Image (cartoon, helix red, strand yellow):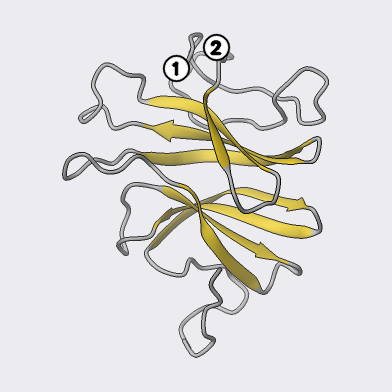
Amino acid sequence: MTELPQIDVYRPRYHFTAPTGWINDPNGLIQWNGKYHLFYQYHPFAPRWGPMHWGHAVSDDLVRWQHLPIALRPEPVRVEGDMSGIFSGSAVDDNGVLTLIYTWFRDPRVHPGVPPEVQCVATSLDGVNLKPSGPLQARQLGPAPGHRRPLAGGLGAGSPAQGALGAPGRCL
């Protein structure tokens, strides 16, 4: 866990920024177990777009943020220019379990013959340590194969977080 020094006069005071590198869009803002958790697309190794990770920060008040370890990481880069990564998603409370639903993108230039975008789940009981659990089976919800914005309302029948995924009609 890292607290950034407040000596950077150019760092916004009321707008969240990543500790280093490139920050993309937020993908999971949730109040869970008394804290606000923010998950966001993040390339920690350069100040430009690259293989996306999910950064993670927590706050008591939505103003002061504590950076936590990277929540989700892509597979190690196999070849120069591999842009595989963790893309869009959501965070939900699934009966007390912090649950992330996200798109795992595999660069087709590097990973030929596999679906480039699959919907995945990761869970945590403590809000810090996440356990990914492979791709979900989903049914086609519309005419957009490869749609990568999981709509997180949930995972199972009867779950308070029940929802839908936009994905091709096969095991992803």
Label 1 SS: loop
Tell me the tag on residue 140.
Answer: 2
Q: Nearer the N terminus, badge 1 or badge 2?
A: 2
Whether the residues at callouts 1 and 2 have beta carbons within 8 Å, the answer is yes
From the top left corner, tell me how far across and down residue 89 is, in percent.
Answer: 56, 38
From the top left corner, tell me how far across and down residue 17 is, in percent.
Answer: 51, 68
| Quadrant housing the N terminus | bottom right
From the top left corner, tell me how far across and down residue 133 is, in percent.
Answer: 55, 29
Q: Is residue 83 toward the left or the right of residue 161 in the image?
A: left
Tell me the tag on residue 145.
Answer: 1
Residue 64 higher or lower than 53, as above or below: below
Tell me the tag on residue 120.
Answer: none
Q: Quadrant of residue 16?
A: bottom right
Q: Residues within 10 Å of mark 2 (few under 14, many from 20)?
A: some
Q: Is residue 126 toward the left or the right of residue 23 in the image?
A: right
From the top left corner, tell me how far across and down residue 117 is, in percent.
Answer: 41, 26
Q: Amino acid at mark 2?
A: Gln
Residue 168 higher or lower than 30, as above or below: above
Q: Amino acid at mark 1?
A: Pro
Q: Residue at x 34, y 39 (%)?
A: 75
Q: Nearer the viewer, residue 10 or 8?
A: 8
Residue 14 higher or lower than 166, as above or below: below
Q: Is residue 77 toward the left or the right of residue 80 in the image?
A: right
Q: Is residue 78 toward the left or the right of residue 125 in the image?
A: left
- Distance from label 1 to label 2 (Cα)? 8 Å
Residue 155 higher or lower than 90, as above or below: above
Q: Residues within 10 Å of mark 1 (few under 14, many from 20)?
A: few
Q: Residue at x 48, y 33 (%)?
A: 103
Counting every numbered tag in the picture gives 2
Label 2 SS: loop
Q: Residue at x 42, y 46 (%)?
A: 73
Q: Residue at x 47, y 18 (%)?
A: 144
